[in-house]
Amino acid sequence: MARKRDVVIAVIIVFSFILTIGFFGLIFLGAFYAEDDVGFGGFGEKVAVIEISGGIYESAPVIRQLKKWGESSSIKALVLHIDSPGGAVAPSQEIYNEILRIRNEEGKPVVVSMSSVAASGGYLISCAADRIMANPGTMTGSIGVILQFPTVGRLLDKVGVDYETVKSGELKDVGSYSRRMTENERKMLTAMVTDTYEQFVDVVCEGRQMEREEVYRIADGSIFSGRQAMELNLVDTLGGFEDAVRLAADLAGIEGEPRLVREIKKKRGIFDILGNLAGDIKEFATGEIQGPRVMYLY
């Protein structure tokens, strides 16, 4: 009787031990892989995928991922999956610089996989990668800079609305929507756009190992298909996303099918939508209208 009781106790102890180990193991894996909504990619050497889609108007989410994956010992290469027409200049440049840092300091290969569109700022970012892969029908290029803002002065005159301004200098209210631009304002903005354009040309020359005159011939805002871009040396090769993953794995020396990890996007709830809507209404009601902004945008 005593022996049977000892066996039962031993079984309970072993079973409890296994449950405890499993429980804490799940907690550990959850903390490690679920932090910041990270998709679980299994063990072993991995390739991290970073999605860059839509307009590029902030750099923090992409840079956070670049830092996290770049500093992770289990991540051997990164694939940037780009589907973007570009966006603001500074965020595009910040992402570009972080990609270069990951390559130089962490020594990890970075491959760009162009989706439907990777133009202007989306192309500038691509120039920081080790390899650029486009689909034959990808829309890319659009090397150039644009600055636009609306003017509604004539409309305000018709409805009898005046807009008074007190300024410290002639050019202080450049981009005002209540009047047309002056000649001096146009000269100043043109000089700034030209300087920003030259910075874009610098990036293409360095990233694609092209002569400046060669870049100038195509850097007029023209867009190209992926196949045309390859003929112009703007991309390295043609292929889809899976091809880019395999290329990244090869550059990193990963044998066999690479494991992928990526952040899991949070679903937007009704309160997120209402919050954004409230912000837009507040901006309109209080007159917080966005001023002129230089853009890498096609």
Image (cartoon, helix red, strand yellow):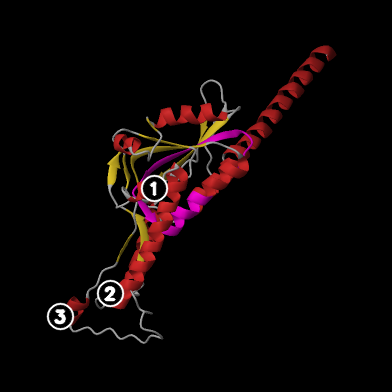
- Mark 2–mark 1 Cα distance, whole angstroms, equals 29 Å
Mark 3 / mark 1, whichever is N-terminal: 1
Residue 177, percent from left and from top: 28, 74
For disc 3, the neighbor class at 10 Å (few under 14, some 14 to 19, many from 20) is few
Q: Vertical placement of 221 versus 194: above or below?
A: above
**SS at circle 1:** helix
Please report the residue visible at 56 percent of the width from the left and 25 percent of the height from the top.
254
Q: Which residue is mark 3?
A: 158
* Residue 177 badge: 2
Q: Amino acid at mark 1?
A: Gly
- The residue at the far right in this view is 2
Mark 2 and mark 1 residues within 8 Å of each other at the beta carbon: no
What amino acid is labelled 3 in the image? Lys
Asked if the residues shown at circle 2 and circle 3 are in contact, with their CB atoms under 8 angstroms apart, the answer is no
Q: Percent position (x, y) of residue 277?
A: 35, 61
Is the residue 196 above or below the residue 122 in the image?
Answer: below
The residue closer to the viewer here, 245 or 218, is 218
Element on which disc 2 rests = loop
Please report whichever mark, 2 or 1, sits nearer to the chain's N-terminal start.
1
Q: Can I make out residue 202 in this image?
A: yes
- Please state the horizontal and vertical placement of residue 259, each as a whole percent of the image: 53, 28
Residue bearing the label numbered 1? 122
How packed mark 1 is, by other alpha carbons closer than 10 Å (few <14, some 14-19, many 20 or more), is: many
Q: Secondary structure at mark 3?
A: helix
Residue 10 location, quadrant: top right
- Residue at the (20%, 79%) spot, across then down: 156
Q: Quadrant of the N terminus?
A: top right
Q: Amino acid at mark 2?
A: Tyr
Q: Which range of residues does the magenta coloring cover?
A: 71-97
